[in-house]
Amino acid sequence: MENNNKYEAVIGLEVHAQLLTNTKAYSSDENIYGAIPNTKTSAITLGHPGTLPVSNKKVIEYAVKLGIAVGAEIRKVNRYARKNYFYADLPKGYQITQDDTPICNGGFIEIPCKKNKTRKINITRIHMEEDAGKSIHDLDPFNTLIDLNRAGVPLLEIVSEPEIKSGEEAFDYIMEVRKLVRHLGICDGNMEEGSLRCDANISVMIKGAKTFGTKVEVKNMNSSRNVRNAIDFEIKRQIDIIEKGGSIVHETRGFDASKGVTLSQRHKEEANDYRYFPEPDLQPIEITTEYISKVKENMPLLPKELFVTYTEQYKLSDYDASLIIEDKNIASYFNQLCKLTNNYKAAANFINGVIKSHLNEKALNITELNIKPVEISDLIRLIDDKKISNSVATSKIFPILLNSNQTAEMIAIENNWIQESDDKVLKELIKDVLAKFPQKVEEYRNGKKGLIGMFMGEVMKLSKGKADPKITNILLRDQLEI
Ligand code: ADP
Ligand code: MG
């Protein structure tokens, strides 16, 4: 961008995470994606007169989990508020949310930045609210259809401080939030299905300025790529306007992903006055310190804690560690495996290599893998004991293990794959080969070192493929260099 040096962008994100509860936030309607439209809509969801909402305990638990995970302060007395507006997909005419008493304040999300470092993006607040229904504009050519199954589905809204500086950083921030909520098991993070949605607030200012520029809000994006592209477009658009002597209008815009542009939706002057007031039908929720400790005790290790264990204790590379942590179930499989073997590097290689390619190929989750950690630890032990080669383990035994109840060792023995690593036996084989090709030995000794491959091949042949290649190579060189 030409004006990169003159301006800086200021970005704050509002991420909505749909919670994986069985029932809705304030009613016992089922919280399920993809059900037949308008079948999960009791009188409470529809806000019929005389109905009363009830707080779903799971929502509180999930909010507390997320709060603990980001290091937020958790509010002891939580009040609900009504946010009033009139729209066809909001049957009650208001959302039950939290106004000035969000359940969490503070905390941060760490995003990757240059040279293996991370940068903290502070969180302003996390509050509980309920989703609206869904307006469907593209099914019927003449009408907008309404599905109210989503109305009342619990959400956590995570509001960041305006500390994000680029589309790329916003992308990373969302990926980190996604990883965290999935890891905690509180949201499936499925952006295409709208389980994680993002509004981006974007402004630009002269580099180093003390006051922020006027912000524009780009609403409701459901892919992290769209968020990045919308922000990049918006930064450029705003800079262009300012450079031409114009000023930024405080407005809400939408992102047209097919054209890669943001488009004005409504100006802030026309903005709704939500007339927030305390929700009269719900008691304030009190959260005790004991409750918070209990939630904490039952939480899995966080991705950043796993990263420290993997890199510092297990000595994995940052790259290997990150690959494993990406998926909570894979991390859990790896943790089980590491209780059975001390060869953490080999364990990581198995997971990031042959196991992941199998899972990708078959579109499986690791929980569906037909091989238990103990079977992988057996394989690793056989390799470490030099009984089988790494390539036999991954390319031959692993595929058989997928469909067999035999142990790795039984398979190796049955197929005659146990390799020869006994020095004495190998030396005999090498002696035979060298005796068979005196001419070649001469040539090797005269400098044709490339012949080592041919000798290796002959020893392998003689051993019926069972010679340990590493040891053979060393012994062979020893013999030839004499
Ligand atoms: P509003 O009252 O318009 O909703 P908030 O103060 O609640 O605004 O902030 C909403 C989001 O906008 C937050 O994520 C915040 O970090 C971000 N934000 C606030 N001011 C700016 C700004 N000037 N430029 C970019 N983002 C901003
Ligand atoms: Mg706001």
Image (tube, rainbow, N blue to C red):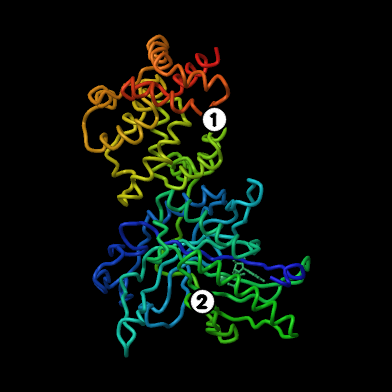
> What amino acid is labelled 1 in the image?
Gln
- Give the class, few, some or many, for how many residues have Cα within 10 Å of label 1's Cα (few <14, many ≥20): few
Q: CA distance from mark 1 to mark 2?
A: 45 Å
Q: Position of residue 275 (x, y in %)?
A: 52, 78
Residue 166 numbered mark, or none: none
Residue at image point 56% right, 57% down: 172
Question: In the figure, is residue 7 to the left or right of 191?
Answer: right
Q: Position of residue 191 (x, y in %)?
A: 42, 63
Question: In the figure, is residue 76 to the left or right of 116?
Answer: left
Q: Position of residue 350 (x, y in %)?
A: 40, 36
Residue at image point 45% right, 16% down: 438
Q: Looking at the picture, does residue 144 appear above or below residue 350?
A: below
> What amino acid is labelled 2 in the image?
Phe
Displayed quadrant of residue 425: top left
Query: Quick one: which residue is furthest to the front in this view?
Result: 439
Residue at image point 50% right, 79% down: 259
Picture quadrant of ligand 2: bottom right
Q: Nearer the viewer, residue 138 or 447?
A: 447
Q: Position of residue 171 (x, y in %)?
A: 55, 61
Q: Looking at the picture, does residue 435 appear above or below residue 107?
A: above
Mark 1 or mark 2, which has the lower sequence index?
2
State the quadrant of the N terminus: bottom right
Residue at image point 44% right, 48% down: 183
- Give the class, few, some or many, for how many residues have Cα within 10 Å of label 2's Cα (few <14, many ≥20): many
Q: Secondary structure at mark 1?
A: helix
Displayed quadrant of residue 55: bottom left
Q: Looking at the picture, does residue 61 appear above or below residue 398?
A: below
Residue receiving disc 2: 255
Residue 313 numbered mark, or none: 1
Q: Secondary structure at mark 2?
A: strand
Q: Are marks 1 and 2 in contact (CB under 8 Å)?
A: no
Query: Quick one: which residue is furthest to the bottom in this view?
Result: 142
